[in-house]
Image (cartoon, rainbow, N blue to C red):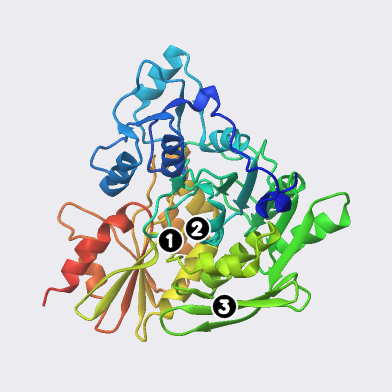
């Protein structure tokens, strides 16, 4: 039975196979790493015994509370633990890893665990790309809500969990590129192949571009996306994104291969976006496919965000779900946590959060921030890892030109300039030619970055914090600083 038949409900519903023994009792040591919290929640909801031991108990308290609510235990490993899952964050307590090795416990990465789980699902939909997967994957679970999907996502949709077992036959997985720093990785290190072992019914590809250290150049990304696509029944391609049109051409040139569905503005697209209208509060997006037109609302700023939701609609349509049913599901979509999320307003200045990592995500969120204000946009940017920041310094500097001014925070890194690499922040600063990037240097007698940011803004402006650690923490204190006379 193919995916379309399954989606249309023909025959008896198929239930997932039992969990693999390796995942029946797991311990996770870095639940804050991208995607791992969703994996933990999904496993717990499928009645696996899941425990976590965060490297810092006071780190990400909201995340830990959500994990507890889903049935995850916050404690050390149990005697019956079958495997350990490590997202790759090098700040974890290495004694836990050493203990696991000493006991002979298998140590799995996020990707391998997702592959094992996907093999138990009757139908899998994968969202893959060098960037921009998060919004599309989160929108997809809403679009397909009538099919009772399960999901494992990189980031939680607003008001929901990053991992869930819906009890149906459909599993949606976000094969996001790793966003932990991996500064301990030697130059040229090769990570596990994307989606190795997966055979999705539908794969949605959001971009195929360089994303060190996973893919050092676009050719590597294209090769990995093509390999995953050829293991899929249908591939939905966001045609305007880097590398995607070339991927579609590759798949069509060499047959046999998957069915290819392109999404974009051109008349030659299989799913055509006819218009995107920004009301000041949300986008109204109209798509056309199979001779029908459908319009839905996207309550998130930024044209990239609107297009990401359109690609999610296209993936559901490619699975065989009626267009009107997808539109109904998207009516509940409220966006993604920390993706152009307004933290508050203080002193007439808005503070908004972004979880962007890749330069193209940074640029897209800065352009989206412009849609939320008539004043200046000031970015507070925390680079992710010296390795990634050095490799992409020029592209990051170009992306930051979309802001009027940028306060550059220290690089979030598990190792300071590990392997004698240059400082990533210095590389970004050197690549910035406009003088609009100001580097914040912490010191014993140095006030926090909030004071520097406050000196750059005035009533009517917007501050966009970009990053996963210090940038995430700075928001509340920045609102307090902006409220001072």
Q: Is residue 1 above or below residue 371?
A: above
Rendered residue at 32%/35% (across/down): 54
Q: Earlier in the sequence, mark 3 or mark 1?
A: 3
Q: Which of 298 and 143 lies nearest the eye of the viewer? A: 143
Q: Earlier in the sequence, mark 1 or mark 2?
A: 2
Q: Is residue 46 above or below residue 84?
A: below
Disc 3 versus disc 1: nearer the observer: 3
Q: Position of residue 187 (x, y in %)?
A: 57, 40
Quadrant for residue 25, please give it.
top left
Which label belongs to residue 336? 1
Q: Is residue 230 left or right of residue 353?
A: right
Quick check: marks 3 and 1 in contact, CB under 8 Å?
no
Q: Is residue 418 above or below residue 458?
A: above
Q: Earlier in the sequence, mark 2 or mark 3?
A: 2
Return the residue at label 3.
285
Q: Position of residue 224 (x, y in %)?
A: 70, 46
Which label belongs to residue 218? none
Q: How many marks?
A: 3
Q: Which of 255 and 45 lies nearest the eye of the viewer? A: 45
Label 3 residue SS: strand
* Within-10-Å neighbours for mark 2: few <14, some 14–19, many 20+: many
Q: Position of residue 102 (x, y in %)?
A: 43, 13
Label 2 residue SS: helix
Rendered residue at 65%/57% (across/down): 205
Quick check: marks 1 and 2 in contact, CB under 8 Å?
yes
Label 1 residue SS: loop
Return the residue at label 2.
138
Q: Quadrant of the N terminus?
A: top right
Q: Which of 415 and 5 lies nearest the eye of the viewer? A: 5
Q: Position of residue 325 (x, y in %)?
A: 59, 66
């Amino acid at each position: 039975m193919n995916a379309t038949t399954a989606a249309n409900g023909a025959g008896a519903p198929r239930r997932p196979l039992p969990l693999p023994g390796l995942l029946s009792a797991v311990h996770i040591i870095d639940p804050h790493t991208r995607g791992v919290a969703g994996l933990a929640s999904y496993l717990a909801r499928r009645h696996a015994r899941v425990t976590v031991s965060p490297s810092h108990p006071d780190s990400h308290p909201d995340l830990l509370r959500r994990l507890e609510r889903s049935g995850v235990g916050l404690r050390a490993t149990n005697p019956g633990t079958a495997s350990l899952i490590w997202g790759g964050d090098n700040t974890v307590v290495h004694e836990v890893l050493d203990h696991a090795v000493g006991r002979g416990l298998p140590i799995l990465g996020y990707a391998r665990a997702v592959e094992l789980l996907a093999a138990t699902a009757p139908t899998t939909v994968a969202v893959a790309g060098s960037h921009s997967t998060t919004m599309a994957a989160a929108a997809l679970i809403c679009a397909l809500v009538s099919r009772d999907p399960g999901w494992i996502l990189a980031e939680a949709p607003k008001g929901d969990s990053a991992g869930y077992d819906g009890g149906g036959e459909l599993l949606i997985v976000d094969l996001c590129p790793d966003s932990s720093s991996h500064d301990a990785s030697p130059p040229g290190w090769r990570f596990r192949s994307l989606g190795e072992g997966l055979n999705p019914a539908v794969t949605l590809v959001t971009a195929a571009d360089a994303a060190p250290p996973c893919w050092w150049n676009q050719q590597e990304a294209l090769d990995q996306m093509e390999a995953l696509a050829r293991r899929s029944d249908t591939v939905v391609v966001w045609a305007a994104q880097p590398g995607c049109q070339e991927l579609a051409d590759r798949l069509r040139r060499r047959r046999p291969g998957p069915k290819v569905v392109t999404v974009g503005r051109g008349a030659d697209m299989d799913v055509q976006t006819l218009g995107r209208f920004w009301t000041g509060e949300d986008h109204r997006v109209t798509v056309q496919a199979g001779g029908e037109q459908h319009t839905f609302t996207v309550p998130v700023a930024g044209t990239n965000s609107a297009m990401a939701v359109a690609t999610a609609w296209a993936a559901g349509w490619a699975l065989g779900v009626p267009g009107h049913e997808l539109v109904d599901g998207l009516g509940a979509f409220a966006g993604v946590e920390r993706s152009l999320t307004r933290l508050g307003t203080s002193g007439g200045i808005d503070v908004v959060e972004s979880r962007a990592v890749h330069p193209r995500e940074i640029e897209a969120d800065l352009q989206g921030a412009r849609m939320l204000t008539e004043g200046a946009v000031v970015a507070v940017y925390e680079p992710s890892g010296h390795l990634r920041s050095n490799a992409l310094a020029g592209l990051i500097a170009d992306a930051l030109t979309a802001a009027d001014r940028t306060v550059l925070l220290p690089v979030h890194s598990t190792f300071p300039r590990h392997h004698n690499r240059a400082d990533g922040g210095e590389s970004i600063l050197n690549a910035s030619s406009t003088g609009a990037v100001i580097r914040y240097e912490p010191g014993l007698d140095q006030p926090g970055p909030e004071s520097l940011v406050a000196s750059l803004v005035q009533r009517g402006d917007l501050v966009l914090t970009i990053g996963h650690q210090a940038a995430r923490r700075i928001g509340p204190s920045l609102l307090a600083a902006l409220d001072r006379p």
